[in-house]
Amino acid sequence: MRYPREHSEHTRKKILQEAAGSIRARGPAGVGVAALMKQAGLTHGGFYAHFPSKDALVAEAIALMFEEARGRFDRSMAEADPRQALANYVDFYLSALHRDARGRGCPVAALSGDMARLEPVARTRFAQGAATLSGWLGAALGGIGVPDPADAGRSMLSELVGALLLARTAIDLAESDAILAASKAAIRARYRLEPAA
């Protein structure tokens, strides 16, 4: 029996969404095709109707993660005042909620340590996504008059990711919270971002 194209696209998207969450939470090596398909409520054999290999799935899931990151970034930037919009993004990124949501958070923070072990197509998708994210930050920083906005965007992304990773590795919750708070305050002061209401 052949399913309509919409059904196939819906199923493929469902597999990608499940994969994106699982890959963020457990890393690409921690995700098996059979378990992933079961988690999605589908049969293992159906996987190959949508993806030629697990490597192809990982690459496409990484692309989806960056699409989702774009949505979060756009929602943060929807604030009329550009400084407040950047403050909103920094607040989201360096929040306990983001720290604790490994399965839904930033793909740069979730996957940086795994990139060296992945196939070239997945590494390329990741590099493109990270460059795009730093470009969005650079454009936003340029919009508030920061000089050399492209470099500033790369620097901001590096600090955001680094702080989030360190906060996630801290054993003591108070230390983790302190890492987030210190980085948030430093970024806000550096770029003169308005305090959140």
Image (cartoon, rainbow, N blue to C red):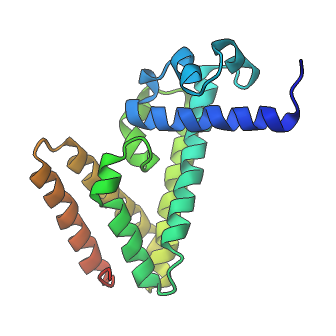
Q: Position of residue 98 (x, y in %)?
A: 35, 54
Which residue is the extreme one toward the front? 41
Q: Position of residue 11 (x, y in %)?
A: 71, 32
Residue at the image position 47 percent from the left and 23 percent from the top: 31
Above or below, comparing residue 21 to residue 44 in the picture:
below
Q: Quadrant of the C terminus?
A: bottom left
* Any part of residue 171 in sight: yes
- Nearer to the camera, 55 or 30: 30
Q: Position of residue 47 (x, y in %)?
A: 67, 20
* Any part of residue 147 in sight: no
Residue at the image position 56 percent from the left and 15 percent from the top: 34
Above or below, comparing residue 27 to residue 72 in the picture:
above
- Position of 49 compared to 166: left or right? right
- Position of 187 compared to 128: left or right? left
- Nearer to the camera, 43 or 91: 43
- Nearer to the camera, 83 or 143: 83
Above or below, comparing residue 142 to residue 132 in the picture:
below
- Position of 136 compared to 29: left or right? right
Residue at the image position 56 percent from the left and 18 percent from the top: 33
- Position of 176 compared to 116: left or right? left
Q: Position of residue 189 (x, y in %)?
A: 24, 79
Above or below, comparing residue 49 to residue 128 in the picture:
above
Residue at the image position 27 percent from the left and 47 percent from the top: 165
Q: Quadrant of the N terminus?
A: top right
